[in-house]
Amino acid sequence: MLQEINNLKKIRGATILAHSYQISRVQDAADLVGDSLELARAATDIDQDVIIFCGVDFMAETAAILSPSKTVILPEPSACCPMAQMITADQLNEAKDVYPKAAVVCYVNSSAEVKAESDICCTSANAVSVVNSLEQSQVIFVPDENLARYVARFTRKEIIPWNGYCYVHSRFRAEDVILARRLHPDAEVLVHPECRPEVIDLADHVYSTSGMGRHAAAAKTREFIIGTETGMLYRLEKENLNKRFYPLSRDAVCQNMKKTSLEKVLKALQTLEPRVVVPEEIAIRARRSIDRMLAVRSG
């Protein structure tokens, strides 16, 4: 099947992008595996006419916004992000009415409509840099309250968090970290900034998935406890054959990320369906927020 996918990629002029939370077989089929920021940047640089996006809906939308001339395919159309569904454009506009002087920072885990109503987007990798780049002293941060509270640790700005969350990262508890350290006393604990504050407080380091990869590769440590979606362990193990990685919890699984199979990737290449199309009036405004994010240097 991988051989057939590779052959079809050449025929279709396609590139396969996969998030680090995808199943191992899909990661193996991808031309690039990364986090939201890595994949967003890649979408603007790809020469091929077709992007097969193995992730969830908002990621494929972002690729379509950044590359309007390309055909962007989401192999599994029901692969949504529950956190992205926790805020609508109308709800955001109501918050803007309450805080008229605040800037709006929108996590990329959001719909195109919400991005269009925001001043600037961010990812978990650059959220702190994005917030600190703003002139406003007050910031509405949507939709992840845990990431908002993490950012608040590194800025003097007033952060107004939205009441949204990632159901996978919010499952982690302080007790999980304590137990994992007891089982693996020589391991470093790396957790994602979408985790609860009490989990972050007990970790050795807080990183986006790409940051976890860079740290694991450079560190002298040989063992790591990973506090993010379990799909990340496959990427880490593949890139660091002489090191060991343990999940902070084996229950940290995003069911929507796991909906994309190798069979669906093949079918997407065969049919070039289902295509992701963002209405132009939404895409133009959403792209401004994304472009502003991409122009910010991460600190």
Image (cartoon, rainbow, N blue to C red):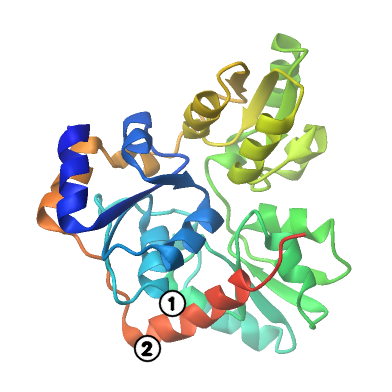
- Residue 39 position in % (x across, y down): 47, 56
Report the label total: 2
Q: Nearer the viewer, residue 223 or 255?
A: 223
Q: Cα distance, mark 1 to mark 2? A: 10 Å
The residue that mark 2 highlights is 281
Are dots 1 and 2 in contact, CB under 8 Å?
A: no
- As drawn, which residue projects farthest toward the right? 156
Q: Residue at x 79, y 78 (%)?
A: 138
Q: Position of residue 139 (x, y in %)?
A: 74, 75
Q: Is residue 17 visible?
A: yes
Residue 27 against residue 109 in the figure, above or below? above
In what element is the residue under mark 2? helix
In the picture of the structure, the residue carrying the numbered disc 1 is: 113
The amino acid on which the numbered mark 2 sits, given as a three-letter code, is Glu
Q: Residue at x 68, y 70 (%)?
A: 296
Quarter of the image with the C terminus is bottom right
